[in-house]
Amino acid sequence: MTFGRDRLRELLDAVLDENNATLERMAQHAYASQWHFSRTFAVGTGESPVALRRRVMLERAAWQLRHGSSVTDAAFAAGYDSVEGFARAFVRAYGYPPSEAARVLGTGRRDPGAPAPVDHWAPAPVDHWLPAPNGVHFHPPTNLWVEEDGGRSTAPDYPAAEVLAQMVQHDLADTRYLLERATELDDDERDRIRFPGLVVLEWDGPEESVSRVLGNLVRAKEMWLASMAGADHPEDSDNGIDSLTVRFEDVAPRWVETIRDIHRRGAWGDVLIDALCDPPESFVLGGVVAHVLTFAAHRRQLARHMMRAVGLDVDHGDPLDWNRSSS
């Protein structure tokens, strides 16, 4: 990325200075009014000063967590007043809680004498990066990295990428909510047939109960990740609520990292050939993600209808409400 003027680089320094946690402090550092500072910075970087600082600090926190920092230390180092506020922001940005960051991002905590786990989805070296319109990222231990072409070479349509990120994160947050609400039902109510004969996708079989709908909601991501990794398709596992929750917490961060990797590489048009299909079929990666999100949204609403039939007062699953509550 070419900033063009040293003045804009000075503004960037003002945003990322450790002591400039507020817009007022940033503007004072740059000897400018808040309005002029914000406008000049946004024109030059495509991102507001506060948004860029928040994103880079979260990237730094993710890297610190990967290398052994506690969640509390990372939270306060990133400028958050509470661990809870930091955790909400981290989940919204990365799709999994900060307590899982070391495992998901590839950790150095594993015993060096132990055999390395088989992981077809090992993250890239810059796995702590978040989508950025300007290519500016945290680069350890204390530096910045500016991607070639401002980070747009692999993501030319940044607004579309932001919408996709919102959809992916909402899908996971909403699924987690429904799994939690399903614990309020006993086993018989979760397994009771509510919509006799209901089939969402013929290869998934009937989805007539809360258990079956939630099971396929989780299983779809497991199946597609296995296909992309060239691994065997997972068995149709136990749909008990405890088992489903464990499976979801395992697959959710891997799903997010996979989508981020596709986005980072600009691989939306890459073709997956699934040799486990008979006959083998080919799928465009962008289509796979759209497919999973489409039927996940459908199944989440089916689960809500079934839960309401039991008498549970569940929300509407509206992304607008989720956005407001997570801000």
Image: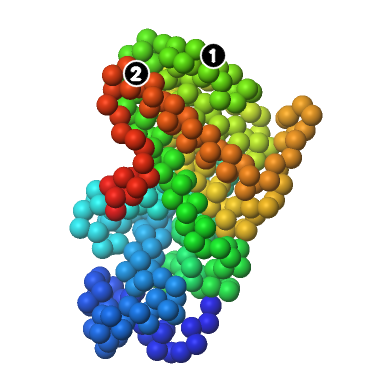
Gap in angstroms between the C-alphas marked 2 and 1: 17 Å
**Percent coordinates x, y for residue 281 in the rendering:** 75, 35
**Percent coordinates x, y for residue 64 in the rendering:** 38, 57
Question: In the rendered structure, which amino acid carries the disc numbered 2?
Answer: Ala
Q: Report the label total.
A: 2
Kindly identify the residue that appears in the image at 43 percent across and 31 percent down.
300
Q: Is residue 326 left or right of residue 131?
A: left
> Could you say which is closer to the camera, residue 67 or residue 238?
238
**Percent coordinates x, y for residue 119 in the rendering:** 58, 41
Q: Name the residue at the right extreme.
A: 279
Secondary structure category for the residue under label 1:
loop
Q: In the rendered image of this protein, does residue 146 appear above or below residue 163? A: below
- Looking at the image, can residue 88 be seen? no
**Percent coordinates x, y for residue 7 in the rendering:** 40, 89
Mark 1 neighbour density, 10 Å: few (under 14) some (14–19) many (20 or more): few
Q: Badge 2 is on which residue?
A: 309
Q: In the rendered image of this protein, does residue 33 appear above or below residue 314? A: below
Secondary structure category for the residue under label 2:
helix
Q: Badge 1 is on which residue?
A: 197
- Looking at the image, can residue 293 be seen? yes
Q: In the rendered image of this protein, does residue 173 appear above or below residue 260? A: above
Kindly identify the residue that appears in the image at 31 percent across and 82 percent down.
37
Q: Which mark is residue 176?
A: none
Colour basis: rainbow
Kindly check if marks 2 and 1 are in contact, taking CB atoms under 8 A apart as contact. no
In which quarter of the view is residue 302 placed?
top left
Mark 2 neighbour density, 10 Å: few (under 14) some (14–19) many (20 or more): few
Q: Is residue 159 left or right of residue 19?
A: right
Q: Name the residue at the left extreme.
A: 81
Question: In the rendered structure, which amino acid carries the disc numbered 1?
Answer: Gly
Instruction: Indicate which disc, 2 or 1, sits on the residue closer to the N terminus.
Output: 1
